[in-house]
Amino acid sequence: MFTGLLCGLWGGFAGALGLSAWAGFAGCTAYFACEKRLLPGAALTLTSSYAGALCAWLMIRGADALGSANSAYALTVGVLVTCIVLLGRFRWTSFVPGTFVGCYSLFAIEDNDMLLLLTSLAVGILLGFACDGGGSRLFARWRPAPEGGAAGGGVS
């Protein structure tokens, strides 16, 4: 319920805020795919997805510098995807799926607007964090009572 409310608000108002709802949902999804939760998960998702966005930017700029031919894109994509996998060995970029989320998301942003992507990913990760924390608190408050136990919590 809480997650649906927050995601509905994001989907409805991201564009009015000048942000990409799609990239925000990618950040939110990456947060939930991360093996860590709450602040550690949000931090790891942010650093990994930002590293991926940087790799995508380098793919584009590298291919442009090499003449924008198909072979230039093949070379830069191959080199930088290898870098993404190698980044998985480092603590702050160890969430490789999050790195790929940041990478592919740049290609979906109009004009490859890096500031729009980074802002939308960050807000999306915060959305995931809020959904996780808020949803967990609501569930703890109103979860069904164990069999034979007293009724679950109520509103105070």
Image: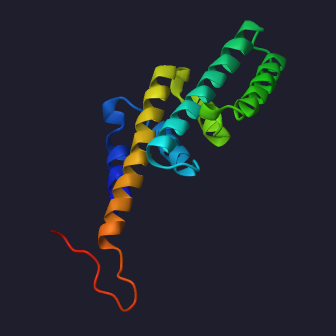
Indicate how the structure is coloured in the image: rainbow
Residue 99, image quadrant: top right
Which quadrant: the N terminus?
bottom left
Residue 69, image quadrant: top right
Q: Is residue 22 above or below residue 54?
A: below
Depth order, front residue of 3/105: 3
Q: Which residue is drawn at 37% across and 48% down?
A: 130
On screen, residue 85 versus residue 123, left or right, reads right
> In the image, residue 3 lies at what x, y percent?
38, 56
Q: Residue at x 59, y 50 (%)?
A: 35
Pick out the residue farthest to the bottom: 148
Q: Residue at x 70, y 30 (%)?
A: 87
Q: Is residue 123 above or below residue 60?
A: below
> In the image, residue 146 lies at what x, y percent?
39, 84
Can residue 7 be seen here? The reply is no
On screen, residue 115 versus residue 86, left or right, reads left
